[in-house]
Image: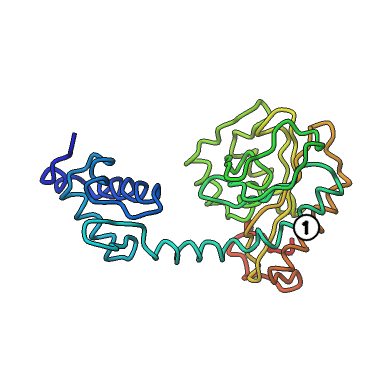
Amino acid sequence: MKKDDNAASSKPSVQVLERMFTLIDVLASREEAVSLKEISERTGLHPSTTHRILNDLAMGRFVDRPESGSYRLGMRFLELGNLVKARLNFREAALVPMRQLHKQIQQPVSLSVRQGDEIVYVERAYSERSGMQVVRAIGGHAPLHLTSNGKLFLAADDAQQVRAYATRTGLPGKTHFSITRLADLESELAKARQHGIARDNEELELGVRCMAAGIYDDQGKLVAGLSISAPADRLDESWLPRLQATAQEISSSLGFNATRPAAPPSNPYARSPSS
């Protein structure tokens, strides 16, 4: 059933955004331009509502009108996509060193970034011979406090930010090893700051342990975490220097200088890139 245009005008802006996302998804599903009639039918929106939102998107160059009554995604998405891609250059810098590290240890190596209160896996190096039953899929995500990479990012936060994270998320657990108390998390993060590495001891998944080191950009900002995953009884501490050296190699390729300190921390919980 089509939605009434007058009723739509009284809806909150969040509904408008929801409709906008729906329209964009329809346009993204087709290579060629799509007619207003088809868009309206596929979204269930009234034609006048569809037309109004598409016109607003066209003003921002998010939508193009190659001819009257038809629409397609605009060049603004390409521009924004290129900006995002430029910010992910560390993936390209990390790929070869990650593969070399995996070749040395024969265990999965993952590259992750922070997105809100979660870690998102953006690259990996693994093989069927690694012996791991689970390899994190690119695009997969997990809570910060349950992953070695996530703990690196939390360790870079100050005390107030860590408490806010705990309040927002409630520190949910996945296994009986999971950290679910703020005091325990703070203790774990203190270790990460002191040693410059973080660990996951079967906290996200039983039988899997991980160790992680940070990757920093030319401004000394933590931009990603590099981790090794292995069966709990096979994680080898001798891999740690190799992991740290690989993270340092990637950081150096991004312009990071370990001898040049970052901006002075504003509190005792902030860590410098060289810690």
Q: Give the residue displayed 63% in from the left and 38% down from the top.
A: 146
Q: Is residue 36 above or below residue 85?
A: above
Counting from the top left corner in percent of width and height, residue 120 is at 58, 47
Residue 172: give x, y in percent of width and height.
Answer: 55, 32
Q: Nearer the viewer, residue 20 or 12?
A: 20
Residue 32 appears left or right of 168: left
Q: Which residue sits at x=49%, y=41%?
A: 167
Quarter of the image with the C terminus in it: bottom right
The image quadrant of residue 144 is top right
Left or right placement of residue 12 versus residue 272 in this view: left
Which residue is at the front of the view, 70 or 85? Answer: 70
Q: Is residue 9 above or below residue 209?
A: below
- Residue 158 against residue 208 in the figure, above or below: below
Q: Would you call the spot at circle 1 few (<14 residues within 10 Å), some (14-19), or many (20 or more)? A: some
Residue 221 in the image: state x and y as whole percent: 62, 64
Q: Nearer the viewer, residue 179 or 141?
A: 141
**Residue type (three-letter) at the residue carrying disc 1:** Pro
- Per the image, the residue denoted by label 1 is 97
Q: Position of residue 15 (x, y in %)?
A: 26, 45
Residue in the picture at 21% in, 61% down: 68
Vertical placement of 219 versus 133: above or below?
below
